[in-house]
Amino acid sequence: MTTPSIPDLIQRYEQLKAVEQTKDALIEDLLRRVTELEEAYQQTRLDHDRETRFNREVQMHEIELMEQITRIKAVMDQEPFLLVMIDGDGMIFQDSFLQQGEQGGKDAANQLWLAVREYSARAFPNIQSPKIVTRIYANVKGLAEACFKAGIVERATLIEDFVRGFNASRLLFDFVDVGSGKDRADDKIAGMVLIQSASGLECSRHSADFWRPSLEYFKLNLYNCHCHQIFLGCSHDNGYARILEDLLADRELVGRISLVEGVPFEKELASIKSSYRVTKFDALFRDSKVPSSIGPSLESWMGTVRSLPTGAHPRPTSPYPSNNGRARVNSNSSGAPNPQTWASATAAAASAPLTDLTVSSKPSTPSPRVVERNKYGQRVDRLDFKTVPKDELKRVKKLKLCNQYFLLGECPNISCYHTHDYKLSKNERIILQAVARMTPCHFGTDCDDPGCIYGHRCPQSEVGKKDCYWGENCRFDISEHGIDTNIVKITRV
């Protein structure tokens, strides 16, 4: 065996040294990896412990919430009630109830309670023993006078007795008299104008903002968890369509409203009633409007006025005294009794000057003698609504002024809710003329009354276009849209 040389030993040493270095590097890598895994483990353990605590807290919180929900649901299920809201100026009880006075009011309330209870038992079987809350809003004095003049009751006080009996029947039944005062009526019915026509009591609107009987009370109960259904009696009045249209986007709210039909639904309401529940209590409410039986209707009387000579074209007056402190007085009278026939009343009205008992002077408007028409023979109103300041238009509309009184000089409507004692400026009168034009004239574009204050074309439509902002819900007929405003001829009256 040969003895290794020094170079060989050095070489072998270097080889061994390299192996040791590789071993040390391996050990260091292993130790580093173990440290990383230990740190990851500790972090995972912390996360796990935190999640465990969180889940335990969530579970405890969930248990508490479920218990709270159970308690709240128990509270919500207590005292369930159904709300009946009726516009009593157009939704009128059957004659048989009104004629019995106080007892009729009690009977009407009890039968209404039974009818609503029976309907709810069929339609809402899950509501256990709900209470029934009823609010009826009406101008009791105006309603009494209308029913008396129509021959429904033998004396007007029977309606007041009916209301008293209705209110005394049940604790949650209220017949609210909104009165004829402007502010009180606006708070409850917001701008309703009753006018007598051949078909009975009708509602006319002078604004596109239609808020109805105690809107705040309606909204309060619409979102009330204890109120499971609202029965809304308003079939006679298109104004309610604005409120109901706004609710169509929320199906849950739509399901909380039932429409009660008395007289047939007006046009705008008929177009949306399919979205709501509809019921009808035939034995309780009239299905026709209160007829007018005292002299000719306002429409026929206006025809009589239009047939008079132009030089003596009078302002429309009422065949009966006004309840607003305004009357037509003959200055040449010496205490003689009033004319007893319609013909003599009309003749006296045409020759007598107007005297206002509430203000020192009345606005007067010279009646035009011609009606301007386009090449199609359609009546053209010169007023351009684009030139009317919108702010002023809104302001004057909020004043709730009586158009007939301020523009024609006399208000023939004994139940008129609108203002008659406002001091109207010249500019406001011009704006009020625009407001009046927003109400469609009964005769449309064929109207030949030079003094007519109402609209004969839709103010929102443009020439040549048969649609407008309101679409199918527009109060103006389709023939009154897109009217050619070029005047080519006149009709002398």
Image: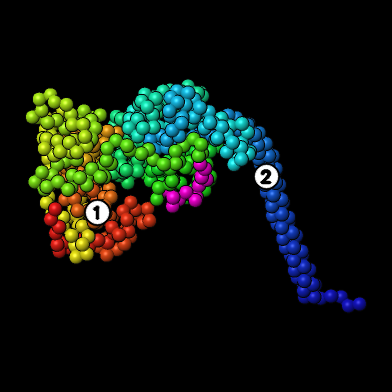
Residue lying at the far bottom of the rendered structure? 2
Helix or strand or loop: what does disc 2 sit on? helix
Q: Within 10 angstroms of label 1, few (less than 14), some, or many (20 or more) residues?
A: many
Placement of 6 over or under 341, stated as above or below: below
Q: Within 10 angstroms of label 2, few (less than 14), some, or many (20 or more) residues?
A: few
Placement of 298 over or under 147, stated as above or below: below
Residue 201 belongs to magenta span: no
Residue nearest the viewer, comparing 438 with 109: 109
Give the distance between the C-alpha atoms of the residues marked 1 and 2, in whole angstroms.
Answer: 74 Å
Whole-percent x and y of residue 16?
A: 78, 68
- The image quarter containing residue 349 is top left
Q: Which residue is mark 1?
A: 456
Residue nearest the viewer, comparing 217 with 240: 240
Helix or strand or loop: what does disc 1 sit on? loop
Whole-percent x and y of residue 47?
A: 67, 47
Q: Nearer the viewer, mark 1 or mark 2?
A: 1
In the picture, measured across the screen, residue 319 lies left or right of residue 74, that is: left
Residue 277 belongs to magenta span: yes
Placement of 327 over or under 477, stated as above or below: above
* Residue beneath the point at 22% across and 64% down: 376
Amino acid type at mark 2: Glu
Quadrant where the N terminus lies?
Answer: bottom right
Amino acid type at mark 1: His
- The image quarter containing residue 197 is top left
Q: Which residue is mark 2?
A: 51
Whole-percent x and y of residue 83?
A: 50, 34
Whole-percent x and y of residue 135?
A: 45, 31
- Does residue 428 appear in the picture of this structure? no
* Residue beneath the point at 46% across and 39% down: 232
- The image quarter containing residue 364 is top left
Q: Point out the stretch of residues depicted in magenta.
A: 268-280
